[in-house]
């Protein structure tokens, strides 16, 4: 009986631990998988059979000489092990006494950019590895740009293989200075640089005696103590409705996950798009009712009044509403093998809402290796090169068939992100991060809108009222038309 209680206490304690999601990124052979394997090994998170298999595989196919090849813990695909590289996003789970971790080991090759975007979409922290011999290279800049694009606020520059430069403080400082010069304009608020050797374990779990000049903490200590509480947007309450729960005539609740902000019993809320208002009657969970709730809790909200709210709609505080509009700009990462078709309309999945959208214009593409903007206007892109290919990134304007309720991605990840779905293949064609709303008058310059000259068509002024109704209905469906005489 006592053992059962101890197990329950352990599970309850583990459940209460804070969760940190992180990704590793770097160039080929910078040691990403080795670093993760070392973290698992030194933090005593491997089972005996895993250790035995690791020692056996290290002798058979390892790339670490007489050492254990910790990278084999993460390189799960046969193709990865044979080539000694990471292709898929490998997720690893472990915990310490202080925190739980989910690590996404993402591929370093440019052709797997979409894999890195997938792995980093939920990350709180990114570890960017560089080889101490090579320093900051093109891939380092590319990965850091992608991290900033994803809105990851905490970055660790892990200067690996310090053992190969004799743990030189001068070399470490050179790399740090070069990296900080690059990362400054990207606006990442928290950047920490750590010298380490993933193969030997220096500064990975414990401070190393071979870097007496380094005054910081080890990588694991940083991961255990980095503060992520303020990373959530707690100011702007957004509750996308996922499901309307009606088990009987006496209960009607709205289920969903709180995207941002804090909601309390008695708060006045507004339903979008109707604009109808009510007050929170109760906040219901599986464990019981709450007085307040915050992200990323999944709850059921009941209201004092019977107002019509359906899946895909949103509850917000009445005095703090998101941007409501059909026209917006976003940074788009193309993830489909099939190239973008500018004449095709797509499904757009935004929070719990699914609708139709079209791509109106591509302002510029981003060269992910140089951060250079490529556009027709600056002469660095031909018009036929505008449609995005796999892994390409661009700033794009959209028009949706019905209004979305969104915030800029940098302000609110949950309500500022979306995916595009090909309506024919059902493939996820792209992921997007919303920059801001585009005013309708600006859209006239952004896209080529068909123009109807009523005089040339022989349509008299007597029909203007009917024409205006048709144009408004087309506009509501996301089809823009200009009328002139």
Image (cartoon, rainbow, N blue to C red):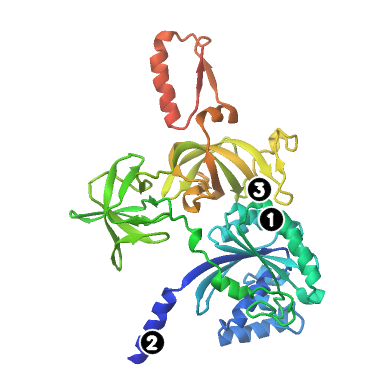
Q: Which residue is mark 3?
A: 392
Distance between the Cα atoms at labels 1 and 3?
A: 21 Å
Determine contact: label 1, label 2, CB under 8 Å.
no
Where residue 471 sits in the image (x, y, percent)? 44, 23
| Left or right placement of residue 424 versus residue 299 in this view | right
Q: Judge whether residue 111 can be spotted in this image.
A: no
Secondary element under disc 3, as helix, strand or loop, is: loop
Query: Image quarter for residue 138?
Result: bottom right
Q: Is residue 56 above or below residue 204?
A: below
The residue positioned 59% from the left and 72% from the top of the image is 222
Secondary element under disc 1, as helix, strand or loop, is: helix
Closer to us: 188 or 42? 188
Closer to us: 31 or 236? 236
Secondary element under disc 2, as helix, strand or loop, is: helix
Quarter in which the N terminus is drawn: bottom left
Mark 1 or 2: in front is: 1
Q: Which residue is mark 2?
A: 6
> Which badge, 3 or 2, is on the more N-terminal residue?
2
> Which badge, 1 or 2, is on the more N-terminal residue?
2
Distance between the Cα atoms at labels 1 and 2?
A: 47 Å
The residue positioned 40% from the left and 51% from the top of the image is 237
Where residue 22 sits in the image (x, y, percent)? 57, 66
At label 2, counting other C-alpha atoms closer than 10 Å, the crowd grade (few under 14, some 14-19, many 20 or more) is: few
Q: Which mark is residue 183?
A: 1
Closer to us: 294 or 251? 294
């Amino acid at each position: 009986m006592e053992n059962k209680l101890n197990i329950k206490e352990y599970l309850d304690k583990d459940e209460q631990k804070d969760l940190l999601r992180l990704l590793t990124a770097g160039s080929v052979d910078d040691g990403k998988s080795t670093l993760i394997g070392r973290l698992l090994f030194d933090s005593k998170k491997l089972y005996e059979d895993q250790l035995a298999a690791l020692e056996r595989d290290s002798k058979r196919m390892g790339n670490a000489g007489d050492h254990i090849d910790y990278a084999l813990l993460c390189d799960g695909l046969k193709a990865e092990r044979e080539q000694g590289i990471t292709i898929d996003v490998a997720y690893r789970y472990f915990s310490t006494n202080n925190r739980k971790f989910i690590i996404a080991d993402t591929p370093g090759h440019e052709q797997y950019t979409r894999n890195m975007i997938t792995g980093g979409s939920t990350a709180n922290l990114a570890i960017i590895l560089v080889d101490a011999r090579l320093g900051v290279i093109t891939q380092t800049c590319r990965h850091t740009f992608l991290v900033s694009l994803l809105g990851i606020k905490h970055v660790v520059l892990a200067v690996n293989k310090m053992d190969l430069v004799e743990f030189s403080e001068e070399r470490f400082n050179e790399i740090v200075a070069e990296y900080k010069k690059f990362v400054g304009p990207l606006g990442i608020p928290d950047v920490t640089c750590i010298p380490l050797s993933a193969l030997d374990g220096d500064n990975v779990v414990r401070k190393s005696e071979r870097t007496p000049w380094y005054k910081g903490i080890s990588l694991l200590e940083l991961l255990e103590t980095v503060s992520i509480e303020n990373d959530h947007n707690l100011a702007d309450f957004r509750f996308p409705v996922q499901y309307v729960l009606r088990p009987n005539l006496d209960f009607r609740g709205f289920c969903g996950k709180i995207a941002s902000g804090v909601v309390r019993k008695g708060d006045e809320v507004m339903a979008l798009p109707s604009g109808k208002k009510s007050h929170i009657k109760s906040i219901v969970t599986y464990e019981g009712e709450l007085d307040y709730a915050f992200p990323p809790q999944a709850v059921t909200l009941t209201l004092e009044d019977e107002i019509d709210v359906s899946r895909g709609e949103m509850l917000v505080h009445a005095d703090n509403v998101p941007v409501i509009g059909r026209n917006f700009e976003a940074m788009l990462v193309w993830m489909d093998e099939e190239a973008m078709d500018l004449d095709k309309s797509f499904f757009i999945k935004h929070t719990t809402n699914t609708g139709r959208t079209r791509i109106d214009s591509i302002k510029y593409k981003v060269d992910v290796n140089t951060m250079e903007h490529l556009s027709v206007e600056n002469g660095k892109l031909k018009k036929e090169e505008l449609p995005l290919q796999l892994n390409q990134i661009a700033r794009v304007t959209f028009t949706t068939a019905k209004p979305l309720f969104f915030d800029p991605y940098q302000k609110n990840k949950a309500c500022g992100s979306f995916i595009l779905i090909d309506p024919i293949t059902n493939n996820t064609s792209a992921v997007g991060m919303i920059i801001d709303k585009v005013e309708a008058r600006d859209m006239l310059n952004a896209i080529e809108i068909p123009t109807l000259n009523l005089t040339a068509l022989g349509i008299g002024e007597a029909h203007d009222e009917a024409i205006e109704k048709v144009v408004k209905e087309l506009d509501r469906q996301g089809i823009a038309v200009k009328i002139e005489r």
